Image (spheres, helix red, strand yellow):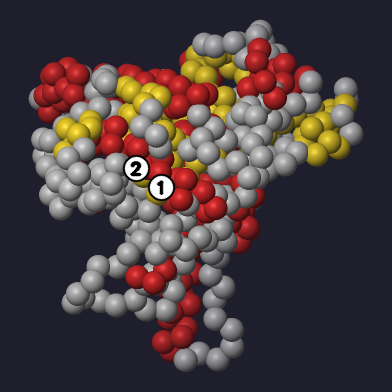
Amino acid sequence: MTCVVMSVVVGSLLVVARHTTFQWVMDPTVEQARALARHEGAARFAFNQGLRLHLNARRASMALKAADAGGDTAAVPWTGFDLINAFNAWKRSEAAGRRFVVDAAGEASVEVTGLAWRTLVSAQVFEEAVVDLGKALKAWTDSRRGKRAGRAVGHPRFKKKNHERGSFRMRNKTSTTKSGARATIRLGENGARSVTLPGIGAIKVHDDTRRLRRMLDKGRARILFATVSRRGGRWRISVNVEAADLHPGAQHPVRDDVDHSGWAGMDRGLHVPVVAALADGTQTVRIDAAPKALRAGQPVTRRLQKSVSRKVKGSVNRRAAVKRLARYHERVRARRHHFLHQVSNALVKTHDRLVIEDLNITGMLANHHLAAAISDAAWGELARQITYKMAWRGGHVLTADRWFASSKTCSACGDVKTTLTLAERVFTCEQCGHTIDRDLNAAVNLATWGLKHHSQVLDPEARGQVTNAHRREGPGPRARASETSPDDVGTLTATAA
C-alpha cells in the first residue's frame, strides 16, 4: 500500500512517507538457497506455533470461566507484541526442547535446550511472522464486530508446507561494528547486483541496484524492511523503501483552488479495456485491446495441468510438474501486470484529475460466463496502480458512487436508459436520439460526475475517500448499529490506510 504525506528536512536526511518497493529476482547459490528455505520454514513454523499458543490460551481461559474458578483468568496473547513475548518464552522453555544428560556416575538429568535450531535463522523472522498473526487476529475480530469494511475475514488458519510458495520478512536494523554503525540490509557489497541480508550474506540479483543505491547515498531514501518470497520456482526480494518525493518536473502543476476543471472519466470494460474522456466529449485515451494473458496462455496451462494430474502424488516427477506449472502461471501474471503498468503510466502522465468507478468486482465474479474474463482484466489492480501513482505526481483520483449508472445515462440530456445489454456497443438515447460509443459515453458521464462532486476530494493525509454503499430496498435485514443505511450514501469517511 502506498501513501503520501508532506516531507520535512531533518539534518541531511529527507524524512518522507512515500513508500515504494524495489523488487529483484535473486540468484542464490546452493548454500544460500538452503538458508532461504530454512528461513521460510522458520517463518511458517513461528506463525503456526504462535497460533497454537494463542488457541491454547483461549481454551484455558474459557475453561476457567466455565468452572467459575476464582482469581485471574489465563492471559491470551492477541497483539503482535504479546505474541512475540509468548513465542520467545516458549522457544526457551522445556516444551520447545530438552535432552537427557547422563554423568560419569550414571545419573540422568534433564537439560532444557529450548528450540535447538533457533540460532540457525535470524530472530527477526520469528518476530515478523507472529506480528503477521497478530494482524490477522485483529482483522478477524474487527470483521466480526463490524469495524472492518469489505468482505468478512475468517479466523487465521495453520499454514501448510508448500514447495512453490512461501515468504519471510526482515527489518532493516542498525548494528554497531568496529568500523561504526551500519544497516543490516545493504546493497552492492558483492558487486552492483547484490543484496546483503542478515544471517544469509550477500546474494546475487539479476538486476542492477544502482538506482536505489544512488537514492540511499544522497539521503533520498531509507530501507525499512525486505520481504523474500518464493514463487514460480524463483526467489524474489522486495525491498520496501521510504523515499523522497518525485522530481518537480515529473509532478503535475498545482491548480488554483477555484479551478475545478480538467476532470477526466475513465471507463473500464472487457471489450475495450480503458477509455478516458473529458466532460465535453473529448476522448483522451483509448486502449482497444488487452493481452488477455490468462486466455492466451490457456492451452499451455491446460497441458501443464494435465501433466500434473497424471503424476503420482508425492513423487519427484509430480513436484517437477507442479514447478513447471507454477513457473508458467508466473509468466502469465507478469504479462498482465506489464500491460497494467503501461496503461496506468499513460493515464497518470497525461491527466492530473481522474474519476474512476467503484466497481463491485466480487459481485460480478458470480457470473460464471464472465468471471474468467473479469479476473484476467484485473480492474482492481489497475485502480490501485492509478491511485498511488497519481498521488506520487500530485494529482487527484475521485471514486464515483457505485450506484451511478454511467453506462445507462445519456451524456447529452442525462436520461437514464432502463435496459442496456452487454452486446450493445453503441449507446442510443431514447429521449433525445443522441448516438455515441458505449464506453465513451460512460467516460464522459464519469467526467461530468467529477465536475459536480469535485468537493469530495479529501486531503492526502486522510488516506482517500470512502463512499458508503446502499442497502437494497424492500424486505430483508435492516441496518443495525455501526452498519450502513440508505441515508449514509455518499458520506465521506477518512480511514487509515
353 or 327, nearer to the observer: 353
Tell me the residue that label 1 is attached to.
449
Amino acid beneath label 2: Asn
Amino acid beneath label 1: Trp
Q: Which residue is depicted at the point 68% across and 43% down?
A: 5
Specify the quadrant of the image occupied by residue 352: top right
- Percent position of residue 223, x then y: 68, 31
Q: Which residue is depicted at the point 44% across and 74% down?
A: 482
- Percent position of residue 69, x then y: 50, 90
Are circles 2 and 1 on residues that touch, CB within 8 Å? yes
Tell me the residue that label 2 is attached to.
445
Mark 2 surroundings within 10 Å by alpha-carbon count, few (fewer than 14), some (14 through 19), many (20 or more): many
200 or 451, nearer to the observer: 451
Please determine whether, in this image, residue 267 is positioned above or below residue 408. Answer: above
Mark 1 surroundings within 10 Å by alpha-carbon count, few (fewer than 14), some (14 through 19), many (20 or more): many
The reply to whether residue 349 is visible in this rendering is yes
Please determine whether, in this image, residue 204 is positioned above or below residue 497. Answer: above
The reply to whether residue 56 is visible in this rendering is no
Specify the quadrant of the image occupied by residue 198: top right
- Percent position of residue 364, x then y: 22, 47
Q: Is residue 54 left or right of residue 373?
A: right
198 or 442, nearer to the observer: 442
- Percent position of residue 127, x then y: 59, 47
